[in-house]
Image (cartoon, grey):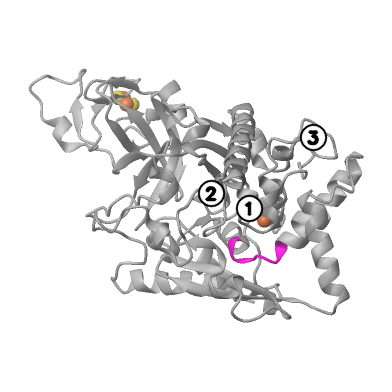
C-alpha cells in the first residue's frame, strides 16, 4: 500500500515531475517507421509533451514542438521541404534543430527569424521504430537491444492504445502469478461464453489450469522472487515442492529491462521472440507495443523486409465489448481495469506480489539517483557495451533452436504449434496478438517449413 504522495511520485511523468525527469534520461519509441513512410509528418505525444515528427525531403528526421511560434498553428499540418518543415500558415521554415530558417513574408533583410526557434529533440530510427530523447545533453546511445538489431529477425509490431498509466503495465511485468488465472481461467471463461471452449489439452488455458489444479490438490503453492541483473531483473519461480537449485529459481525468466520493456526467455523462446514495450505517452495513456521478432533457421527462408509492418488494434470489438480471447488482451484488460491511475492506497499486497514491490523499489531508487544528479541504470555511452544487450543476462544463450518444442516448458511447446489447427477448429497462432500480424499467413507458413526442417534433421540424425 502506498500513500497518495508516493503514488503520484511513481506514476506522473510530465516535465518537472520526479518520474518524468527519470524517464527523460532514456530513448523512447514514438512512432512506427512504417507509418512515416506513408506520411512524412506526424503528430506525436510522449511523456505529456505534444510534438511533431517529420522526415525532410533529404531523408533526415526531425522532432519539434507542435505549435508554430508565429501564431500557434499545429506543425502537424506542415510541409516537408529539403531543409526542414514549413508551417502551412505563413511559411516559416524550421530545421531539425528547431532553428527558424525562413520567414518568407517578413522583410528579406530582417533578423527576426534569428530570434525565434522551436524546441527540438534528437530522433533516430532503429528496428522499425522512430525513437526520441527528451533529456539533458549529451544524449546517450540509443540502446541496441537484441531484437531490434539481430540480423535473422522477421519482425512485426502490434500496438494498442491503453487508457491507463504506464506503471500498471510495468507492475504486471513483475507479476508472473497472474498468468494462471488471467490467461487460464479467464481465457476458459471467455471461450465458454463464445461457445468455443474445448477440452484441448494443448491449449494453454487448459494446460495452465490443469497444472494449477494439480498443485492445489497436493497442497502446494508457487513462490516468486526477483533475480537482479545489471539491466533489471528476471522473475524466479518454483513451487514449494521444487528444489532450490531449479533453473526457474536460480536463473528466472522473462527479464524486465528497465525502465519499461519486458523480454521473454532467457534461453527458451523458440522461433518467436518478443518484447512488450509500454511506452508512457502521458499520465493516463500508454502505447503498448508487442514487438515480435521471429527467428527461423536460415534454411526456412524467411523473406527480407524493407520495413517492419505495424498494426494498431482496437481494444473493443464492433459491439463495443472488450476483447478477451487472446493472451495480450487479457493482460490489457487487467491493466486498464485497475483504473486510469490505480489507487495504490487501497491495495493489499501479498507475498506473491514480491516482484511488483521489487519493481517499485527499483523505480524509486532510479528516481532518487536522477534527483541527486546521477545517471540512472541502462543509460549506455560506450558503443562496445551497447551491442545485443540482453544476451548478457545470465541464462541467455542467443540460440535459435530448430524446434521450439524440444527445449522449453509447455507454453513454448504450445507455441511450436502455431501453424496447426487446434481442437477448437482455429489456428493456435490466433490465441495471442500474433493473430493481428500483418504477415500472419507468412508466419504460419514459416512455422510449417521450420517443422518440416526439424523433422528432416531429426530423421537424418536417427539414420546416422
Ligand atoms: S502560424 Fe506558422 S507561420 Fe504563421
Ligand atoms: Fe500476462
Observer able to see residue 49: no
Would the CB of label 3 be found within 8 Å of ligand 2?
Answer: no
Q: Position of residue 407 (x, y in %)?
A: 61, 56
Q: Give the foreground label among 3 and 2.
A: 2
Foreground: 386 or 58?
386
Q: CA distance from mark 3 to mark 2?
A: 26 Å
Residue 153 pos. (x, y %): 46, 39
Q: Does residue 419 belong to the magenta stretch?
A: no
At numbered mark 3, what does the secondary structure look like: helix, strand or loop? Answer: loop
Q: Earlier in the sequence, mark 2 or mark 1?
A: 2
Image mark for residue 426: 3
The residue range painted magenta reads: 173-178
**Numbered badge on residue 6:** none
Q: Position of residue 195 (x, y in %)?
A: 92, 40
The answer to whether the residues at label 2 and label 1 have Cβ atoms under 8 Å apart is yes
Q: Which mark is residue 406?
A: 1
Query: Within 10 angstroms of label 3, few (less than 14), some, or many (20 or more) residues?
Result: few
Q: Earlier in the sequence, mark 3 or mark 2?
A: 2
- On whether residue 176 falls in the magenta region, the answer is yes
Q: How many marks?
A: 3
Q: Residue at x 70, y 59 (%)?
A: 338
Q: Position of residue 210 (x, y in %)?
A: 84, 61
Displayed quadrant of residue 93: top left
Rounded to the nearest angstrom, the CA distance separating label 1 from label 3 is 23 Å
Secondary structure beneath disc 1? Answer: helix
Amino acid at each position: 500500500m502506498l500513500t497518495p504522495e508516493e503514488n503520484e511520485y511513481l506514476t506522473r511523468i510530465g516535465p518537472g515531475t520526479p518520474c518524468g525527469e527519470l524517464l527523460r534520461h532514456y530513448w523512447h519509441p514514438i512512432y512506427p517507421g512504417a507509418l512515416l513512410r506513408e506520411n512524412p509528418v506526424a503528430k506525436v505525444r510522449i511523456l505529456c509533451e505534444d510534438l511533431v515528427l517529420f522526415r525532410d525531403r533529404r531523408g533526415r528526421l526531425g522532432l519539434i514542438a507542435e505549435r508554430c511560434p508565429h501564431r500557434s498553428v499545429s506543425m502537424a499540418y506542415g510541409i516537408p521541404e529539403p531543409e526542414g518543415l514549413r508551417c502551412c500558415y505563413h511559411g516559416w521554415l524550421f530545421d531539425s534543430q528547431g532553428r527558424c530558417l525562413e520567414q518568407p513574408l517578413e522583410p528579406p533583410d530582417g533578423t527576426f527569424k534569428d530570434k525565434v526557434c522551436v524546441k527540438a529533440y534528437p530522433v533516430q530510427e532503429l528496428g522499425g521504430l522512430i525513437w526520441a530523447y527528451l533529456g539533458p545533453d549529451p544524449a546517450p546511445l540509443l540502446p541496441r537491444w537484441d531484437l531490434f538489431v539481430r540480423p535473422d529477425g522477421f519482425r512485426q509490431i502490434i500496438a494498442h492504445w491503453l487508457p491507463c498509466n504506464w506503471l500498471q503495465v510495468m507492475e504486471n511485468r513483475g507479476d508472473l502469478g497472474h498468468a494462471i488465472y488471467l490467461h487460464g481461467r479467464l481465457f476458459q471463461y471467455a471461450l465458454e461464453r463464445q461457445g468455443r471452449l474445448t477440452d484441448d489439452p494443448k491449449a494453454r488455458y487448459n494446460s495452465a489450469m490443469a497444472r494449477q489444479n494439480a498443485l492445489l490438490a497436493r497442497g502446494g503453492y508457487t513462490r516468486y522472487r526477483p533475480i537482479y541483473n545489471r539491466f533489471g531483473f528476471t522473475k524466479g519461480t518454483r513451487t514449494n515442492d521444487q528444489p532450490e537449485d531449479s533453473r526457474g529459481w536460480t536463473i528466472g525468466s522473462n527479464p524486465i529491462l528497465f525502465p519499461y520493456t519486458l523480454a521473454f526467455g532467457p534461453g527458451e523462446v523458440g522461433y518467436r521472440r518478443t518484447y512488450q514495450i509500454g511506452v508512457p505517452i502521458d499520465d493516463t495513456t500508454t502505447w503498448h507495443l508487442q514487438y515480435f521478432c521471429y527467428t527461423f533457421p536460415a534454411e526456412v527462408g524467411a523473406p527480407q523486409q524493407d520495413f517492419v509492418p505495424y498494426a494498431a488494434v482496437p481494444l473493443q470489438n464492433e459491439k463495443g465489448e472488450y476483447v478477451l480471447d487472446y493472451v495480450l488482451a487479457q493482460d490489457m484488460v487487467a491493466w486498464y481495469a485497475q483504473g486510469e491511475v490505480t489507487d495504490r492506497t487501497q491495495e493489499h499486497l501479498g507475498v506473491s506480489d514480491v516482484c511488483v514491490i521489487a519493481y517499485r523499489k527499483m523505480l524509486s531508487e532510479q528516481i532518487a539517483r536522477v534527483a541527486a544528479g546521477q545517471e540512472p541504470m541502462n543509460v549506455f555511452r560506450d558503443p562496445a557495451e551497447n551491442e545485443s544487450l540482453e544476451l548478457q543476462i545470465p541464462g541467455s544463450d542467443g540460440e535459435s533452436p530448430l524446434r521450439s518444442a524440444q527445449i522449453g516448458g509447455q507454453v513454448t511447446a504450445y507455441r511450436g504449434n502455431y501453424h496447426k489447427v487446434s481442437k477448437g477448429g482455429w489456428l493456435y497462432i490466433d490465441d495471442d496478438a500474433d493473430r493481428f500480424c500483418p504477415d500472419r499467413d507468412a508466419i504460419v507458413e514459416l512455422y510449417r517449413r521450420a517443422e518440416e526442417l526439424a523433422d528432416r534433421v531429426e530423421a537424418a540424425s536417427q539414420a546416422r
